[in-house]
Amino acid sequence: MAFSAFATGTAQEQAPRRKSKIALLLLLPGILYLMLFFLVPLVSLVITSFQAPVPYGDIGEFQTAFKWQNYVDVVNTYGEHILRSFGYAILATIFALLFSYPLAYFIGVKARRWPLLQNLMLVLVIAPFFISFLLRTLAWKSILSDESFVISGLKALSLMAPDAHFTGTAAAVVFGLTYNFIPFMTLPLYSNLQQLDTRLLEAGSDLYSTPSKTFFKVTVPLSMTGIVSGVLLTFIPAAGDYINASRDFLGGTGTAMIGNVIESNFLVTLNYPVAAALSIILMAVILVMVTVYVKRSGTEDLL
Amino acid sequence: MLQGAGVGASALLLAACSSAPSAAPTAAVDRSEKQKSLRFDSRDTYRNTTGEDYPLLEKFTEASGISVTYSSAVSDDNVYYSKVKNQLKMGQDIGADASVLSDWMAARWIRLGYVQDLNLDRIPNLSDIRSRFALPDNDPRRSLSLPWRSGFTGIAWNKEELPEGLTSVSDLWDPSLSGKVGVMSAMRDTLGLIMLDAGVDIEGADWGDSEFTSAVNTLRAQVTGGQVRGIKGNQYKEDLKSGKTIAAIARAGDIMQINAEAGDKWGFAIPAKGGVLWSDVVVIPIGSTHRSNAEDFINFYYDPMNAVQVAAATNFISPVDIRQLEIDVLDEAVSSNRMVFPTPVTFETSRTFRTLSQGEEQRYGAQYQTVLLAA
């Protein structure tokens, strides 16, 4: 859905109208793939979320039922974690946008005159992908640990209290989410801004518009599809992330996100209905938030 | 065609949704006579190696003609179980002929009928098992699981920061250590010590929900009050090394390891009110087709001469009674380490967390997670 933002032109109008058997045949692997790896697990997840424990059954043993109370229970027990997840994801998305927009603007618009610099900066944006997500997060854990140069320096400058910590806090988790998802924000923005017609900016200037007014009235609206794509590509995985908030990485006991709760219920307590109900809630809330966001952004064609 | 795919998908769906109990699986046919191979799933720290070599594994292969594939697949019991539980339930091969598990996980496998009966006649060296490990509550005949490695859980501290040392779990809750205490995420280690500190005999059957809840509440109060800096898996060692924590609930072997790596900076003690004796055991999964090969392997490692070498190389307590050999074979500096070569008196200072019933395992596990997730 979000990737359609990269497309240009009115795709609907350009779509072929004649039915083709070859096209259907070519579509078949994709449909089968979606059925097998999306539809079947999704329905399985929904059914699991309503399961009830087998009477006198062992740990991890559940039977098909319609125990809708599972949903009430998880909201009551883990409501705080659900809110925290979306709070962290929203903050990380905003920070990623604030960092990425100037970067993408520079690479896509200002650096057009220097293709070498443009390519070099693009490589720098993509470079973190060459290293495992886990390793990058572990590296930040070391960089931001109490004894690190960064934290020691902040404490020496009295910018942090002597006994304060950064890892294990909400700020560390949001920082980690922001860092890890910045490329997902930057690339669609770059892809969009690269096509920005700078003559429109000159026209704004000719019409006595201030640079900031031109930016908000011309540049931002024209790059809205890039912004929406970047926001979706950042917000959705950030809301379900469980690495950054993990106690073994940047989080602590008070920063657990919904992904950590799902992991714990799925792997440790083997409470599959709770894990499934939480997954469904996560999906549903994301879907609602994304729909509202896209409608309000005036880019319904993304859906 | 799409209809067909839909039917197939429905069948898959029904299979995927099934987590109900089924009849206990039956043991696979043993093909050890014809297939001289063994796949052994264990933990990374249990290899006794010399550089890149596995001296005892090679010696075993030379003596028996059985080739061994050693894997460190069991880094986390819960993750390992999640990977293999569906095959176990159906009695299928899990890709391992013997698996080393925590005793509590082995108790679950035994309860669910996921392990094969051992032919004890094929393991004559079992006669040398330490009495402490001979009769566990989850395997009264010792015919389904055998102890593989053990160790003590107690309290550790940074000797430079706390030269006086610590003597009890309650010492960890001293306000002067606020925000500098680490605890292990392993439930039986951490809550076991807290319960012992409260005077509960964790090995006995006369404790239940109220004692466990009280220990959970003690830990929760220390976590929410900021006394505990982190509840971690193996990462707790790194926190001690980096100075993030200066005191912790810890395993003796881990402290020996960080002392060897970063200088003799940390002290370890079994608390005055008792420590936790943990054990990992070896089981033969129900779908293994090389039971006899696995039994030969276990018998080889239960040979006292081999067992003493393994204990000295890995710093874990051997299940084999090797008291005389320790003195005869090892340097005194090594054999006098009572955390690896304990005497019967050392064993008396620690208790083993009793096996939980299926109901307790579910309830207590969920309750403990509420502390870890601050739920």
Image (tube, rainbow, N blue to C red):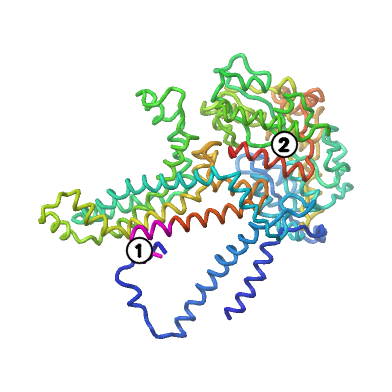
- Is residue B79 visible in this depiction of the protein? yes
State whether residue B149 is above or below residue B177.
below
Which percent across, then down, holds residue A65? 70, 60
Element class at badge 2? helix
The quarter of the picture where the N terminus of chain A appears is bottom left
Name the foreground residue: A192 vs B42. Answer: A192
Q: Amino acid at mark 1?
A: Ala
The residue shown at (76%, 36%) is B307
- In the rendering, which numbered label is found on residue B310? 2
- The span picked out in magenta is A290-303
Around disc 2, counting alpha carbons within 10 Å, would you say few (fewer than 14), some (14 to 19), or many (20 or more)?
Answer: many
Residue drawn 39% across the image and 56% down it: A293
Q: Position of residue B300 (x, y in %)?
A: 79, 44
Q: Which residue is mark 1?
A: A5
Q: Disc 1 vs disc 2: which is toward the camera?
A: 1
Residue B96 percent location from the top left of the image: 71, 54
**Judging from the image, what secondary structure is the residue with disc 1 in?**
helix
* Residue most extreme to the top: B164
Chain letter of disc 2?
A: B
> Is A110 or B179 nearer to us in this picture?
B179
Which image quadrant: the C terminus of chain A? bottom left
Q: From the viewer's perspective, is A121 left or right of B280?
A: left
Which amino acid does the dot numbered 2 rest on? Answer: Val
At label 1, counting other C-alpha atoms closer than 10 Å, the crowd grade (few under 14, some 14-19, many 20 or more) is many
Question: Nearest the camera: B80 or A41?
Answer: A41
Residue at position x 86%, y 37% in the image: B135
Q: Is residue B4 above or below residue A250?
A: below
Decide if residue A108 is on the left or right side of residue B274: left
